[in-house]
Image (tube, rainbow, N blue to C red):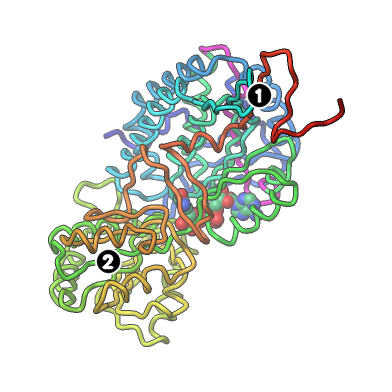
Amino acid sequence: MSTMHTVLRDLGIQAVNSGGSTGSQWWSGRNDGSLLSSVNPSTGEQIAGVYPCSADDYQRIVKESVEAFRAWRMVPAPKRGEIVRLIGHALREKKDQLGTLVSLEVGKIKAEGDGEVQEMIDMADFAVGQSRMLYGVTMQSERPTHRMSEQWHPLGPVGVITAFNFPVAVWAWNAFVAAVAGDTVIWKPSPKAPLCAVAVQQICNRVMQQQGYAGIFSLLIAEHPALAEQMVQDERIPLISFTGSVPVGRRVASMVGQRLGRTLLELSGNNAVIVDQTADVDMAVRAVLFGAVGTAGQRCTTTRRLLIHESRYEELIGRLVKAYAQVHIGNPLDKDILMGPLIDHMAVEGYRAALDEIKKEGGEILCGGHVLSRPGYFVEPTIVRAQNRWPIVQRETFAPILYVMTFRTLDEALAMHNDVPQGLSSAMFSNDVRQCERFLSAAGSDCGIANINIGTSGAEIGGAFGGEKDTGGGREAGSDSWKAYMRRQTNTVNWGTELPLAQGIKFGS
Ligand code: NAD
């Protein structure tokens, strides 16, 4: 593993970086705005600075993206796929360095930082295959000598707004599929992880320059929401793919809705695991530990609620509390560390406030519950005996707090499970095939993701990823998610000499 200095150098990160780019021929310059500081959450120290984009930079980026789209949409999709393949290859070469930068900038342990880059590589491979499979269907016409079919066309520039906690992978989920679909992409990353975005843009720029393209993948780092909102309201951008919290997602959706644009929303989760009376407790403990403590509880799919059959409560909680005590917390780049810091001071305050509210409600803290007194933003992973209806349990606190509750019947468990505003990921541990099928049935979990005998987090890219209710309804990554990035056109061709109307309508002579 490389040191911070060599990692930054290998990824082209300077002490001060530009925050806007449309390709290697153009990076934005210094502007009057303040320098955005990228802070290592393990130490609270600055890693490097970035100049956010100005309003003029924004106009330039959108203009180039619109112009590049006109040419890119006419490049055959498999050729677009070939370029994404080369970007995937470039990412393979920088996997170690980029994985380390993810750890440095957002505090994920190294294995998870590398895993995130692997996810980008997997998405590139997936998109390359998809580039030859942008299938339309044919339909049987009710009229003689008519042929009906549908085809999928590129949509236009796509605005991709991403959250801090997946600072590179979420861009790849969107950007690679959008690119093979023939769209150009303008990325507005989280200001909490600007260096990851600059590094990815550098990698992309090199490949695109070698291939003779610019303006396909652009970067728009903004310090304040104003510029992002300008993009959200911009009619030149037909699709805004937004990943983030429910309140911001709601605002983005209503702004895009005002102009009748499209949104793809990937918002907060409040994910539960149900452990029934037949469950394999060994597996459940491991899955809940990874789901609740991994990424310091800062995944959209983090396990936040654990619903245990009352007959298994003592056994499962006893084992979990022991497992929590063995979690090493510290510098995410050190071996043996399982949990790094929260992203910033605000996140620590959110953890503290949640615990205050839990105590007021009468929640029993079974383990954890403290902010660590050391540099950086470290907290203890926490387990709380709680009640599902408490407002604090109904909300997503982006921290490692697990709420546990018990149930007697599966009906009771399912009612509790679905009784939250969010609907992202869910899991059930059971060896009873009837209970499992019930959980997966139309009357079972109401989430976009429902798993049996694996946890709520760590989805594979081959499936469509996303959730229902307040999670926003969007789907990204695998399956037929590519359709969100294209426009569908229904074609009817009359190859005869008559002009029959549909539904047998006679009009005129
Ligand atoms: P956030 O909502 O604070 O920010 C997300 C992005 O929106 C950032 O890029 C931010 O700069 C931008 N933004 C802020 N205000 C904006 C505005 N008014 N208009 C347009 N953009 C604006 O979220 P966060 O704290 O970065 O990330 C954590 C949240 O993201 C959690 O709720 C988590 O569940 C969610 N998330 C969801 C998924 C998913 O796929 N469902 C994946 C990762 C994270």
Mark 2: amino acid: Ile
Residues rendered magenta in the picture? 210-228
Question: Viewer-nearest of labels 1 and 2?
Answer: 1
Q: Residue at x 41, y 27 (%)?
A: 124
Mark 1 crowd level (few <14, some 14–19, many ≥20, 10 Å Cα): some
**Is the residue under label 2 in contact with that under label 1 (CB below 8 Å)?**
no
**Which quarter of the figure has residue 495?**
top right
Q: In this view of the protein, can residue 43 be seen by the observer?
A: no
Q: Which mark is residue 492?
A: 1
Q: Secondary structure at mark 2?
A: strand
Q: If you read the primary sequence from the N terminus, does the residue marked by circle 1 or circle 2 appear first?
A: 2
User: Quick one: 503 or 453, which is closer to the camera?
Assistant: 503
User: Quick one: 88 or 508, which is closer to the camera?
Assistant: 508
Q: Residue at x 32, y 76 (%)?
A: 412
Mark 2 crowd level (few <14, some 14–19, many ≥20, 10 Å Cα): many
Q: Left or right? Give the position of 335 relative to 250.
A: left
Image location (x, y in percent) of residue 151? 58, 25
Quarter of the image with the C terminus is top right
Q: Is residue 5 one of those drawn in magenta?
A: no
Q: Which mark is residue 274?
A: 2
Q: Left or right? Give the position of 2 relative to 479.
A: left
Q: Is residue 222 one of those drawn in magenta?
A: yes
